[in-house]
Image (cartoon, rainbow, N blue to C red):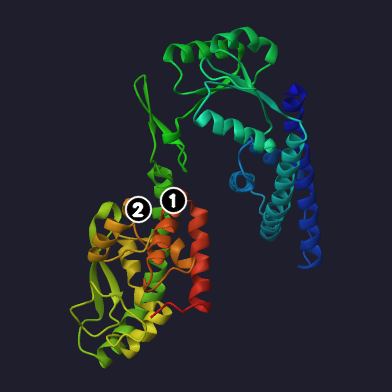
């Protein structure tokens, strides 16, 4: 348990942070002078920078490196703290009118902080995991109620020593094994000597026993965690809703159910699509429209009904790339498809035919990133044969998506291709973040430039 560790680690962590901040300030000053030939007018604000940073990290409790979290969560926490730091420094800059400070220096310093602190935080995280593997910073734990998910948890704790959770054994009335310490009633007699930090309770235990254990744990300041039944051991984060004093588990919530996340994604969509419409589509539509009209009769746009969020049908916009035909909704484009026009072949190979969909994004029918929308007949076919296919429609469809940057774009020739698309779309929906959206956008640009094999 090492109680001293919990008292000392936050201060050691903050001391390391302070050293990194001072180092970043000094390196930024060197870069400013040696590369940009600019002198910093004052060093007085060093202490201010340091105090603001330590205040932010202590307030946000960055020193709490979760036992079961990975390095990406550590970096995400760091990025949030840097944003807070920049916001506070900007406000102070205006309030105290410190305009003599170099904006270039501040920009260099923020980038230097991100680089050095990222290395430092991940290094600390790795060192802490290694320390726990060797037996340090551990927490004593027991499981009350054996069988089912309890056994899986015990195996996980034994396998993942980096969690630093020392599993002492079970208490159960029915099952006995080498790790069983006794019956549930024996727990109250032995708990005091075990110096427990954590109690895991199998949810199938009788309600009165669960209440008795929780009351005991509250009195002894021991953390209690309920082990859900195997039916709830799903690859997703569970959340809870409270109806007065009644608590229920939400088993199929997704990140975009959160109003803040939905706002962030929608704001990104509006800003991005508006820029594309103003600076690209404003001249691209007349130019491409003229070329389409010169080659073949018919409309400039191909408008097709597709399923969107919650299966709502919307009219998806594309530049027309084929001669008008009766099979557009049911027959996919294939390689050397005779229906595709000359200008259409160019539009499809460069994905320029999809550009009008930024209008759909602005109107809120689509998103920049999401599962690619299929035609209504295709959806009717696939949802009958592909497991979890309809989960793709829990969010807005996208102009690009995770499946597309992983190589699953274009014609669906084999069943594994649509199954892989659905699997990747499901992963995206369950694990959405604004950073994932940005990475997909960057990878999409790369795919458009260097990989056009399936675009026809």
- The residue lying at 73 percent from left, 51 percent from top is 119
Q: Is residue 63 left or right of residue 337?
A: right
Please name whichever residue, 396 or 2, is drawn nearer the observer in this view of the structure: 2
Label 2 crowd (10 A; few <14 / some 14-19 / many >=20): few
Q: Residue 318 vs residue 3: left or right?
A: left
Residue 315: give x, y in percent of width and height.
23, 66
| Residue farthest along the bottom direction in this orientation | 294
Q: Name the mark nearer the viewer: 2 or 1.
A: 2
Q: Is residue 446 above or below residue 254?
A: below
The answer, for residue 223, to whether it is visible in the render is yes
Q: Residue at x 34, y 62 (%)?
A: 361
Q: Which mark is residue 387?
A: 2
Front residue of 352/334: it is 334
User: Which numbered circle lies on residue 264?
Assistant: 1
- For numbered disc 2, what is the local secondary structure? loop
Rendering coords of residue 434 (x, y %): 49, 53
Placement of 87 over or under 425, stated as above or below? above
Q: Is 158 in front, or is 50?
A: 158
The N terminus sits in image quarter:
top right
Q: Secondary structure at mark 1?
A: helix
Relative to 55, say whether 180 is above or below: above
Residue 224's label in the rendered image is none
Q: Nearer the viewer, residue 296 or 143?
A: 143
- List x then y, in percent, for residue 70: 62, 44
Coordinates of residue 220 in the picture (x, y in percent): 61, 12
Residue found 31% across the figure and 78% down from its top? 333
**Looking at the image, is 40 positioned above or below residue 79?**
below
């Amino acid at each position: 348990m090492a109680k001293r560790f919990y008292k000392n680690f936050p201060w050691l962590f903050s001391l390391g942070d302070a050293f990194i901040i001072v180092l970043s300030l000094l390196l930024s000053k060197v870069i400013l002078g040696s590369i940009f030939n600019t002198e910093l007018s004052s060093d007085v604000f060093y202490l201010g920078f340091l105090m603001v940073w330590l205040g932010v990290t202590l307030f946000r409790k960055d020193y709490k490196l979760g036992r079961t979290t990975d390095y990406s969560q550590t970096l995400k926490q760091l990025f949030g703290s840097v944003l807070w730091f920049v916001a506070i420094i900007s406000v102070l800059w205006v309030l105290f009118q410190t305009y003599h400070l170099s904006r270039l220096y501040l920009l260099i310093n923020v980038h230097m902080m991100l680089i050095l602190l990222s290395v430092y935080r991940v290094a600390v995280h790795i060192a802490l995991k290694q320390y726990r593997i060797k037996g340090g910073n551990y927490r004593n734990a027991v499981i009350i109620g054996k069988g089912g998910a309890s056994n899986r948890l015990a195996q996980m704790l034994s396998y993942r020593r980096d969690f630093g959770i020392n599993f002492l054994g079970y208490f159960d009335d029915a099952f006995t094994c080498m790790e069983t310490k006794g019956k549930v009633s024996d727990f109250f007699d032995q708990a005091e000597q075990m110096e427990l930090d954590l109690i895991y309770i199998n949810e199938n235990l009788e309600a009165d026993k669960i209440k008795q254990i929780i009351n005991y744990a509250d009195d002894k300041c021991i953390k209690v965690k309920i082990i859900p039944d195997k039916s709830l051991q799903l690859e997703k984060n569970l959340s809870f809703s409270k109806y007065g004093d009644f608590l229920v588990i939400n088993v199929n919530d997704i990140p975009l159910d959160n109003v803040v996340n939905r706002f962030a994604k929608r704001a990104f969509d509006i800003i991005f699509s508006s820029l594309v419409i103003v600076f690209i589509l404003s001249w691209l539509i007349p130019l491409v429209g003229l070329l389409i009209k010169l080659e073949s009769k018919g409309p400039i746009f191909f408008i097709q009904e597709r399923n969107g969020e919650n299966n709502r049908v919307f009219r998806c916009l594309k530049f027309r790339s084929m001669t008008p035909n009766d099979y557009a909704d049911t027959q996919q484009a294939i390689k050397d498809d005779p229906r595709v026009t000359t200008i259409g072949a160019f539009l499809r190979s460069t994905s320029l035919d999809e550009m009008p969909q930024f209008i759909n994004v602005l109107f809120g029918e689509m998103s920049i990133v999401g599962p690619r929308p299929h035609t209504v007949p295709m959806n009717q076919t696939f949802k009958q044969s592909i497991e979890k296919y309809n989960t793709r429609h829990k969010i807005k469809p996208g102009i690009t998506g995770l499946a597309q940057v992983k190589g699953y774009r274009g014609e669906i020739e084999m069943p594994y291709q649509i199954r892989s698309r659905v699997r990747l779309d499901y992963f995206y929906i369950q694990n959405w973040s604004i950073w994932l959206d940005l990475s997909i956008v960057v990878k999409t640009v790369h795919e458009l430039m260097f990989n056009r094999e399936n675009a026809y």
